[in-house]
Structure formats: structure tokens, C-alpha cells
Amino acid sequence: MVDYKKIGLVNTREMFKKAVNGGYAIPAFNFNNMEQMQAIIQAAVETKSPVILQVSKGARDYANPTLLRYMAEGAVEYAKELGCPNPQIVLHLDHGDSFETCKSCIDMGFSSVMYDGSALPYEENIRISRQVVEYAHKYDVTVECELGVLAGVEDEVASEVSHYTKPEEVIDFATRTGCDSLAISIGTSHGAYKFKPEQCTVDPQTGRLVPPPLAFDVLEAVEKKLPGFPIVLHGSSSVPQEEVDIINANGGALKAAVGIPRKAAKSAVCKINIDSDSRLAMTAAIRKHMAEHPDHFDPRQYLKPARESMKKMYIHKIVNVLGSNDKL
Ligand SMILES: [Zn+2]
């Protein structure tokens, strides 16, 4: 049993309380490799932002759970070395698919876990969520649960259609599970291909696809039912068209990727998950570098610009979208 507090991590409780009161959101950046982690920590330290490092089941399978856990421990020391005496870093499991997965993360030093039972029948979702919360709270680990289904693909989490969260269920769900935060579905979607072209309209000026509007009325209704309760948005990458263009100009073949408009971040949501934008920034920088330097073969030559590009994107999100800068 690893005590996350002993390795310098924090849970989300205080962080979310401050974010809700301050009207900003905490960035939750997925990571599965060293360059991403370096870019995230550099961005958080330079902007004085709290940050959630999140690990999906796919990332655990890709990188190894033990390595990722020690990377997060290293991240705390790295932040201090970069000049941040009291970094606020959460190590969070993204989309835990079972009680066992959540327990294994809690036991190895995660300070926060998500249990995603959104695809299960309502009562079954409550039952397992409650079980995860009871175990997590024994160790002061915070728990995010999910109500309503997001469309799209994120590692093994995939759904064809989204079902908006039903606002009339949220009080019952939050009370009976005891969860610390709630991910809701208002039409955001996982992955880089968030919407089919036929769901979008075309901007007559640029010719680009404009995604369908999010169900802000659902968000507002949920906030009315649970005033001040931490709400989480998944699938909120904006999928910058410039990155998609760079990828396609350098041998890539991404088709009509469409992301979430920036307005989604301007609500009272206190945690926003960003994964695809980091993947796009990294891939665009690598493809561009490779195309410009066909003689390079040292991974550091192309991973360095990739890291810089991700860092720039993280800083942009923190400062211009979430507003979590200057909060340490
Ligand atoms: Zn998600």
C-alpha cells in the first residue's frame, strides 16, 4: 500500500473546491510517456497551475502501471526542481472499468480514481460506484463517477451514440454513491473524430466543419440540482485545425477531425479532460520535423520539438481556456 501523500501528491477535494469558488477549471492531461509528462509539468510550473496527471487503462497497458506511478512521483520532484515549492499534482485513473482496477490504482499510490459505470444499468452503476467510493475514502482518495454516456472512442471505452445525463437523476446518484465529482454527458465526445461530417454544418467563410452545439441546458440543469458540486467534462479536446493541417501536409491522412468549441470550458465545470489535442500536437511536430529533416534518426531530434509543441498547447489551455494559471 503506497500512501500518495508521502510521495507529495494531493487528491482533488481542495483543488475542486477552489476551482468551483474561483470559476475556473483544472486541466486533466492524459500521459503515457516521458515527453508528455515533462511538457505537462513544465507548463504547470511556468503558469503556476494545479494539474491532474491522468492515466487511462490503455496507458497502463502501454507503459506499465508501475512505471507510470513512479513517473508521477518523479513529476512532483521535477516540479520542485523547476522552482515550484508546493506543486499541486493529482495522479488520477481515467475511466476505471471495474472495482479491481480502481483498487489496484489506489493501492499503488493514485490520489484520485474515476470509476466509469455509465454504460451499466443505473442501479448497477450506483452499486459499484458506491463500492469504489467506500474503499477509496478509507485512504482519502477522491472518486469521479459518470452518469450519461459519451460517444466516441477512448482506449477501450467506445460508444456509438451519446446519451445525455438526465438532470433528474444527479441528486440521487451523488447522494447514494458518495462520489466527489461527477462526469456528465452534454454532447462532448471522445477522440479526434468527435462528430460525423453529417452532424456538422459548414462555415461558409472558411469551408470548415462546425460541430453541433453542446447541450448547455443539461449542464445548467445539473448545476441547479447540485449547486457547487464538482462537474467534469470528458472529450473536450478542441482538435486545432492547424495541427490537423500540419499532419496532413506532411504525409498524414486525418479526415475531417472536429473538436469541441471553446465555449464548453467557460462554464462552471471544474475539471476538463484533454488528451487528443496532445496527441495531435505531438504527431504534427514529429511529421513536420521528419519531412524537413529526412536525414535525422536520433529520437531526441524530433521528440524535442514534439515536447515543445505539446508544452505550448498545454500553456494555451491553462491560460486561455481553463483559467487555472496563477493559482498556486
Ligand atoms: Zn473520458
Image (tube, rainbow, N blue to C red):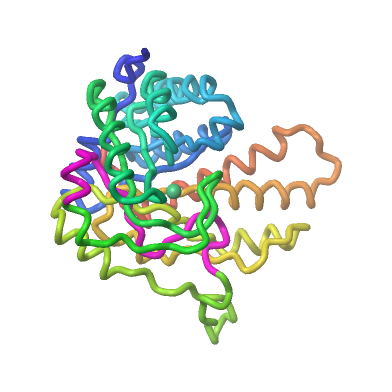
Residue at 41% x, 20% y: name it.
Answer: 77
Give the side of residue 57 with respect to residue 321, left or right.
right
Work out whether 282 lies above or below 8.
below
Quadrant containing the N terminus is top left
Residue 168 x/y as whole percent? 19, 61
Give the side of residue 220 with respect to residue 45, left or right.
left
The reply to whether residue 261 is visible in this rendering is yes
Give the side of residue 309 with respect to residue 236, left or right.
right
Determine the image quadrant of residue 135.
Answer: top left
Work out whether 100 lies above or below 161.
above
Residue 308 x/y as whole percent? 57, 43
Quadrant containing the C terminus is top left
Q: Is residue 191 magenta?
A: yes
Q: How many badges with numbers are in the image?
A: 0
Residue at 24% x, 40% y: name it.
Answer: 179
The reply to whether residue 318 is visible in this rendering is no
Residue at 57% x, 25% y: name it.
Answer: 64
Work out whether 49 lies above or below 7.
below
Residue 42 x/y as whole percent? 46, 35
Q: Is residue 295 magenta?
A: no
Residue at 60% x, 52% y: name it.
Answer: 280
Give the side of residue 300 with respect to residue 65, left or right.
right
Q: Residue furthest bottom?
A: 204
Q: Nearer the viewer, residue 122 or 161?
A: 122
Residue 154 x/y as whole percent? 53, 49
Range of magenta residues: 172-195
